[in-house]
């Protein structure tokens, strides 16, 4: 694994003429944020040693390097999911590469179903915590001591400082930013009504098929993490209609304008802090 990572890092350093400080993962329907990247360099996943292929609908499968608000960053335009048949090491491999390239902050976005009637389609929800219902953990196996300790604490999976910046900006700009708990499941089948009732009873506000593995690996690597979900559909706790991928992507696109504003502002604040 280390040998493969070194090959990936060597290749990317030959293509990217700066050290990134930010990593961003784009979820389903959130490709518009990629257009905000300046001086962008695009590298298809299939050209990157060690990367697998993104097969999820609407995921572009490109690594983008460049700047937003003058902050050097790497952006995954499309993530890898456990439901695609990849193992957890493959799903989270890009996070390890981010760390080796110098990334300090990870921003994760996703499309999620709402278990909370107050969080309607098109809403933005900043994650305050999560519940792992995927039945596995990306840290299972030999510990990578160079990245982090065997038993990393998850008492604060999402950075309180980054949350404060997002909360303050949203409030001052009249952007509705909810806060809630995300429940991760494997998919790819959507959840049953009974499952949604169970997750809600455990304290979850949202349910989705990603994010948690990447966050766990990022925390193991001592990164500061912020995650924001776009609510793309209401759980069938509240209705009896079938969900569609078109509905999910359309609602994600509606919310992307405010999501871009929030992320741009946080990057601006971090740039002021780091320079």
Image: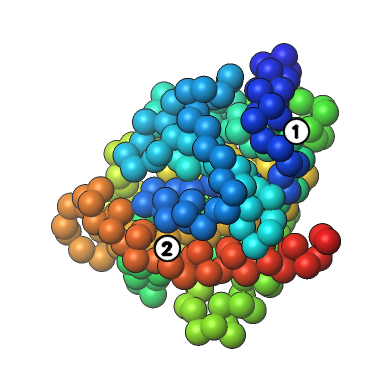
Instruction: Give left or right: position of 180 versus 111.
Output: right
State which quadrant residue 113 falls in. Answer: bottom left
Residue at image location 61% in from the left, 77% down from the top: 169
Front-most of residues 274 and 176 = 274
Residue at image location 48% in from the left, 30% down from the top: 44
Distance, label 2 to label 1, CA atoms, is: 29 Å
Residue identifier under label 1: 100
Kindly state the secondary structure of the residue where label 2 is placed: helix
Residue at image location 32% in from the left, 47% down from the top: 191
Q: Earlier in the sequence, mark 2 or mark 1?
A: 1
Instruction: Give left or right: position of 193 versus 52.
Output: left
Give the answer, above or below, for where 83 lies relative to 194.
above
The x and y percentages for residue 78 are 45, 40
The x and y percentages for residue 34 are 48, 51
Residue identifier under label 2: 256
Farthest residue toward the top? 3
Do labels 2 and 1 touch, CB within 8 Å?
A: no
Kindly state the secondary structure of the residue where label 1 is placed: helix
Instruction: Give left or right: position of 242 versus 187.
Output: left
The x and y percentages for residue 261 are 53, 69
Q: Is residue 194 visible?
A: no
Q: Quadrant of the C terminus?
A: bottom right
Query: Please, which colouring scheme is shown?
Result: rainbow
């Amino acid at each position: 694994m280390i040998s493969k990572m070194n090959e990936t890092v060597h290749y990317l350093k030959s293509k990217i003429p700066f050290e990134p400080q930010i990593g961003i993962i784009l979820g389903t329907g959130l490709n518009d944020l990629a257009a905000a990247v300046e001086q962008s360099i695009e590298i298809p996943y299939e050209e990157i040693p060690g990367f697998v292929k993104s097969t999820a609908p609407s995921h572009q499968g490109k690594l983008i390097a460049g700047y937003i608000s003058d902050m050097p960053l790497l952006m995954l335009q499309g993530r890898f999911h456990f439901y695609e048949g990849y193992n957890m090491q493959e799903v989270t491999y890009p996070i390890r590469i981010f760390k080796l390239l110098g990334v300090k902050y990870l921003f994760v976005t996703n499309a999620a179903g709402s278990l909370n009637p107050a969080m309607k389609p098109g809403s933005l929800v900043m994650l305050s915590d999560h519940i792992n219902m995927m039945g596995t953990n990306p840290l299972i196996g030999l510990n990578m001591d160079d990245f982090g300790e065997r038993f990393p604490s998850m008492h604060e999976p999402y950075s309180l400082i980054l949350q404060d910046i997002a909360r303050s900006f949203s409030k001052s700009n009249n952007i509705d930013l909810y806060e809630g708990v995300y429940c991760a499941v494997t998919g790819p089948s959507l959840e049953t009504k009974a499952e949604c009732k169970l997750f809600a009873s455990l304290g979850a506000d949202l349910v989705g098929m990603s994010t948690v593995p990447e966050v766990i690996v990022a925390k193991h690597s001592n990164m500061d993490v912020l995650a924001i979900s776009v609510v793309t559909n209401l759980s069938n706790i509240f209705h009896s209609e079938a969900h569609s991928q078109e509905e999910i992507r359309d609602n994600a696109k509606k919310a992307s304008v405010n999501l871009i504003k929030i992320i741009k502002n946080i990057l601006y604040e971090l740039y002021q802090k780091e320079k």
